[in-house]
Image (cartoon, helix red, strand yellow):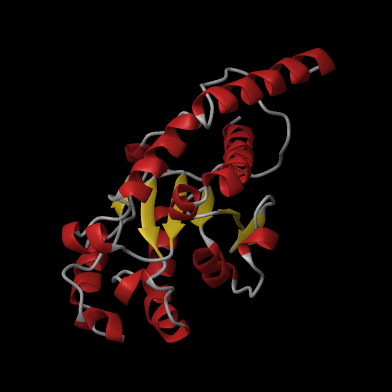
Amino acid sequence: MDVEERFKALLHDTLSFIKTGFREPSLEPSETYKGHAPVDKSVNRYDPDIDEEIGRCIKCRLHERRRHAVPGTGNTTADILFIGEGPGEQEDIQGLPFVGKAGQLLTRMLAAIDLKREDVYITNIVKCRPPGNRNPFPDEVASCLPYLQRQIEMIAPLIIVCLGGPAAQALLNSELRITALRGQIHRVTDIPVIATYHPAAVLRFPEKYKRDVWNDLKLLRDFYRDIRS
């Protein structure tokens, strides 16, 4: 892509962001990231028994108040795995992740980079709702993390996206804040990991976070295109 084409692509993205909050689909290919080999996705290795196991789990205090455990939902052979911190009220009621207002915004975020919810898999670090939607405690994360690790092994995503600081810190085993973790490519067991702000944070403070989230979405879009090409 030459300088003129890059300028046109940047202008398109900027105008689309101003107009829609995110972007309209672009046909321009990316040349930003190279070198990650594709994974064979022809076999579905996801064992649904893990969902039932999560539904029966009593390993930490979070099970005491739950209506439903929330294992995850979506394409179990997905290229992209999204991980939040924990279920909220609507998720606890329905047993599905990201179905409230933050989930509606996540759906729009996916559409902004030409993805649908059925294209990806969505789950959380902890599978039961923390009281009052507080951040999960370390022992709760430790109890749930083996479930997530097994899901990652079975889904074998090409890219993982962490939504929010607690998710990124738990998966990356880092104490850094989300402001330091976002905007770059990390790796967990050789899987690229991108961290960004949780959609709920964008809903609360759109002027503060929307632009950064859009930049992270473009990072995901471009990196995914390069992997697939």
| For residue 40, side relative to residue 99 (left or right) | right
Would residue 42 be visible to someone looking at this image?
A: no
Residue nearest the viewer, comparing 76 with 107: 107
Residue occupying image coordinates x 57% and y 40%: 217
Quadrant position of the N terminus in the picture: top right
Would residue 61 be visible to someone looking at this image?
A: yes
Residue nearest the viewer, comparing 141 with 67: 67
In the rendered image of this protein, does residue 69 appear above or below residue 78?
Answer: below
Give the percent coordinates (x, y) of residue 77: 37, 46
Residue nearest the viewer, comparing 49 with 19: 19
Residue occupying image coordinates x 62% and y 62%: 178
Q: In which quarter of the image is residue 106?
A: top left
In the rendered image of this protein, does residue 107 appear above or below residue 85?
Answer: above
Quadrant position of the C terminus in the picture: top right
Residue occupying image coordinates x 63% and y 24%: 13
| For residue 64, side relative to residue 88 (left or right) | left
Give the percent coordinates (x, y) of residue 159: 54, 49
Residue nearest the viewer, comparing 41 with 115: 115
Residue occupying image coordinates x 51% and y 22%: 24
Q: What is the total number of numbered labels drawn onto the structure image? A: 0
Give the percent coordinates (x, y) of residue 209: 58, 48
Give the percent coordinates (x, y) of residue 158: 53, 47
* Residue found at the very far right of the displayed protein: 3
Q: In which quarter of the image is residue 153?
A: bottom left
In the rendered image of this protein, does residue 1 appear above or below residue 142?
Answer: above
